[in-house]
Image (spheres, grey):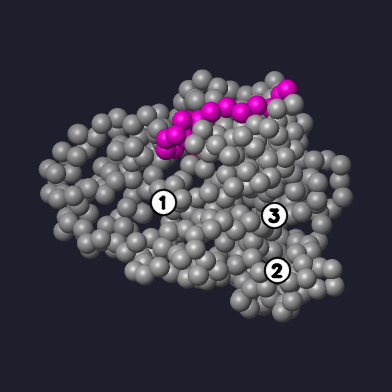
Amino acid sequence: MHYLKKGGKIMLKFNVEKISIPLKQHVGAPCAAIVEVGEHVKRGQLIATPTGLGANIHASLSGTVEEVKEGEIVLKLDKEQSDDYVKLPDTDDKLQRIKDAGLVGLGGAGFPVGIKLSTKIEGGCIIANSAECEPVLSHNIKFIEENPDIIIRGLQYMIEITGAARAYIAIKTKYTKAMLAIGKACKDIPNISVKILPDMYPAGDERVIVREILGKVLDIGQLPATVGATISNVETIKRVAEAIELGKPLIDKDITVGGRVKNPQVFFDVPINLPFSEFINRTGGYVEPHGEIVKGGPFTGKHATEESVIEKTTGGILVAMPHIHGKPKVGILICECGAGEERLKEIAKAMGSEVVSVQRCKRMKPDKNGRLRCELPGICPGQAEKVLNIKKDGGQGIITGTCQD
């Protein structure tokens, strides 16, 4: 980011006049705005609260409320912005601090962290998900390399809150620098240690982590808490430490900008709700030719535009190659670990292909709510039957979202 010092403050500089703040950046219901049009708000100020399952939303930058709509708040930004923020209310209750901060899982799911950590796991374990599962994304590993002590402190707070006995950092051996850094940071802490994950996709899936780290297989729909585990990704743990130590609400995000841009890079602590265009420009712009913008990672990311905004759960801004011209008729093969039906059909349309067959990996089974889930994520079966079905339906090619095939 571009920083300028003024009167002892660090000033933030953006080529943005307004930001749109979505009222749903988490699992659950949209938040309700508690500000009015014309009101001036400061960075870090609480501006929306949950109406059910959800998490507080704070202004990521200072400005004047221009619109309050059903799904968003539009803020006209002050011309001068600093990295100062309104601190969270004073409390010695660490769990309450996390709830007040509006923390949600930052690995993509967006479940409120305060609710997750309310489950006691006496004698169990906290697991730091350091898989950096999606290709291209690299901000979590880079943060571990540079700031391992913050992750250790965050884990210690989470152990204290949940009653866990220990914590593990689950990481792949290919991340040598990060593994050595975090290993050194915890070497004298008896209840925190490093555990190795295999270099496969989706190593960051919660059930894969439980299977590989604890040697236990979770059934479809079972949560890690049923085997005494709580799993959080690296940035979530970082933000837990920030909320407790600094009284900082969730107003900044770490992101990776990659793909067809001139200078792919990681950005730490960028204010949430800035548009993607701001960071594409900061990497030097596009490498031509380029295709669509993807929000998230290559496997599970969604189509986005330059006007899309960074949300609490945004981890990547990726610029793809142009879509190739596909076969006239294709089948899609869906897997829980990758792109879903809607996304695969979107890709097929962009390739100029007609979808004539929809197949699902044979491991996909319904959970208690009817949602199709993978029985054994990362352990993929052969798909000959599904391929033959696509061929029978007239498919001339396959677009697949499976993790291994």
Q: Is residue 185 left or right of residue 341?
A: right
Q: Amino acid at mark 3?
A: Leu
Which corner quadrant of the image does residue 286 belong to? Answer: bottom left
Does 300 sit above or below residue 226?
below
Which corner quadrant of the image does residue 20 belong to? Answer: bottom right
Q: Which residues are magenta?
A: 190-208
Q: Check if residue 18 falls in the magenta segment.
A: no
Q: Amino acid at mark 2?
A: Tyr
Q: Earlier in the sequence, mark 2 or mark 1?
A: 2
> Cα distance, mark 2 to mark 3?
20 Å
The residue nearer to you, when weighing 301 against 196, is 196
Q: Identify the mark at residue 198; answer none if there is no mark.
A: none
Q: Which residue is mark 2?
A: 3
Q: Position of residue 237 (x, y in %)?
A: 67, 42
Between disc 2 and disc 1, the foreground one is 2
Residue 28 visible (yes or no):
no
> Cα distance, mark 2 to mark 1?
31 Å
Residue at image x 70%, y 20%? 123
Does 277 sit above or below residue 214?
below
Q: Earlier in the sequence, mark 2 or mark 3?
A: 2
Q: Which residue is mark 3?
A: 250
Q: Which residue is mark 1?
A: 298
Q: Residues within 10 Å of mark 2 (few under 14, many from 20)?
A: some
Does 53 sit above or below residue 386?
below
Mark 2 and mark 3 residues within 8 Å of each other at the beta carbon: no
